[in-house]
Amino acid sequence: MATQTVGTDATTTLTGVTFAKSLSAADVATIQQGIKNDQINGFPTYPGAFSLQGLLYVPNRGVLKVLDGDVIAWDPETGWPILISADAVAASPSSWNVA
C-alpha cells in the first residue's frame, strides 16, 4: 500500500470550533448540527455527535477523545467530522490555518 498526498481544495472550506471545557451550549449545538451521518441518504444530523465532556462521536466509526485546544472541524457539504490536535495546529510550520 502506498501513501497518498491528501489536502483540501482551499484552506478555508471547513467549519470548526476550538475545544475548551468552557464552550457554551450554543457552540456544542453548532458542532452537533454540523456533523452528519454518511451512511444515511441525505446525511441527516447525527444526534449527540459531540458532548461537552470532550467525546466526538464519528458516525458509524467510533468515539474520539477531544482535548483542550484541539479543533473539531467538519465539511459543511457532507458533515464529515475532522479532529485536529492542538499541537498540530500550533506547530511551526503547520498546514492548518485556524482563524
Image: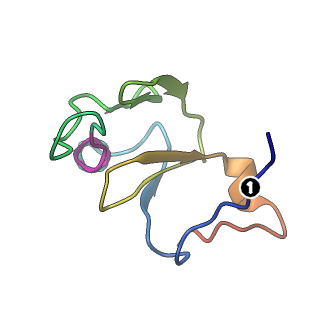
Above or below, 9 against 28 in this view is: below
Callout 1 environment at 10 Å: few (<14), some (14 to 19), or many (20+)?
Answer: few
Residue 82 image point, x, y percent: 50, 47
Left or right of 46, for residue 67: right
- Total numbered circles: 1
Read off the magenta span.
30-36
Q: Give the residue displayed 37% in from the left and 24% down from the top.
A: 60
Provide residue 8's location: percent of width, then percent of height. Answer: 55, 69
Identity, as a three-letter code, of the amino acid under mark 1: Gln
Q: Is residue 29 above or below residue 63?
A: below
Quadrant placement of the N terminus: top right
What residue sits 44% from the left and 72% below the top?
Answer: 13
Quarter assignment of residue 83: top right
Q: How is the image coloured?
A: rainbow
Q: What element carries label 1?
A: loop
Please indicate whether residue 27 sits to the left or right of residue 15 in the image: left
- Residue 93 is situated, as x and y percent measured from the top left of the image, at 83, 70
- The residue that mark 1 highlights is 4
When asked about the image quadrant of residue 15, the answer is bottom left
Prevalent SS, magenta region: helix
Report the residue at 15% width, 47% height from top: 42
Quick check: is 26 in the magenta stretch?
A: no
Placement of 56 over or under 99, stated as above or below = above
Q: In the current view of this chain or complex, which residue is farthest to the front?
A: 1
Q: Is 32 covered by the magenta stretch?
A: yes
The residue most toward the right is 92
State the residue in front, 36 or 68. 36
Tell me where residue 81 appears, x and y as whole percent: 43, 45
Where 11 sits versus 70, above or below?
A: below
Q: Measuring 42% from the left and 41% from the top, which residue is drawn there?
A: 22
